[in-house]
Image: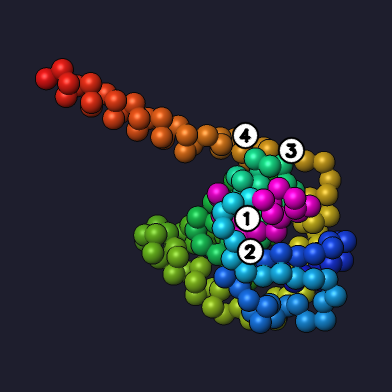
Amino acid sequence: MPPPRALQDAGSDQIVVCGNLQDADLWCSTGMTLPITTGPRSHRGFMDLLATADVLVTSPGLTTLLEAGALGVPTVCLPPRNLTQIFNGDRFARSVGDQCRIRWPADVIDLEAPEQARLDGEEAGLAFIAAALRGCEPEAFAPWLQEGVAGALASAQGPRDWHALTNAAGAGGTRHVASMLRELAFERQTTSMMV
């Protein structure tokens, strides 16, 4: 969770944190005057909220990034917490721009190192990241993260093609897979009727 103060300083009028967090988990909200709402949302509830958002600040989960891209919502990409998020962050940066992504400092996680560790298997890469993050005290990184969020928010306000990631990755994957399954089922049904 980024320090909300960066969002407050950027002129946000409210912050909504979607997920299994409660107000007590928001160690970085002390002294905030901006209203913060926390709690899980259904997918439909999240999408309705996203459609009205001025900006999305999110970990680099591909589905969330694609959904924001499909709606053209300015997005700030937080530092990754696993291998997939490293790849998603790279994809986001190539499509939208690196200024809207926040990277871990090299002394926390050099993002090339998990890839090297992964040569010993996926679990080795994940274990490397987990060990590096276990050593991080959230309070110690609050100023760094606040600065990163503030810079990324400023970049997100500028002109960008927020549909770029969606355009590059495509948005019809589920429909395409469903169509293939229907064709396969129809083909099998036709074959069995002919036998």
Check if mark 3's residue and mark 4's residue have beta carbons within 8 Å: yes
Q: Which residue is mark 2?
A: 18
Mark 2, secondary structure of its residue: strand
Query: Upstream in the sequence, badge 3 or badge 1?
Result: 1
Q: Residue at x 80, y 64 (%)?
A: 14
Q: Position of residue 143 (x, y in %)?
A: 77, 74
Give the Cα separation between the discs numbered 3 and 2: 25 Å
Check if mark 3's residue and mark 1's residue have beta carbons within 8 Å: no
Q: Is residue 70 above or below residue 131?
A: above
Label 1 crowd (10 A; few <14 / some 14-19 / many >=20): some
Instruction: Give the magenta part as a residue range.
Output: 48-63
Q: Which residue is mark 4?
A: 167
Locate the N terminus by quadrant. bottom right
Q: Give the numbered dot on residue 90.
A: none
Please state which amino acid type lies under the numbered disc 1. Answer: Phe
Please state which amino acid type lies under the numbered disc 4. Answer: Asn
Discs 3/2, front: 2
Give the Cα separation between the discs numbered 1 and 4: 22 Å
Mark 1, secondary structure of its residue: helix
Q: Nearer the viewer, residue 88 or 22?
A: 22
Q: Position of residue 48 (x, y in %)?
A: 67, 50
Q: Is residue 42 above or below residue 144?
A: above
Q: Which residue is mark 1?
A: 46
Q: Give the numbered dot on residue 161.
A: 3
Please state which amino acid type lies under the numbered disc 2. Answer: Cys
Mark 4, secondary structure of its residue: helix
Query: Upstream in the sequence, badge 3 or badge 4?
Result: 3
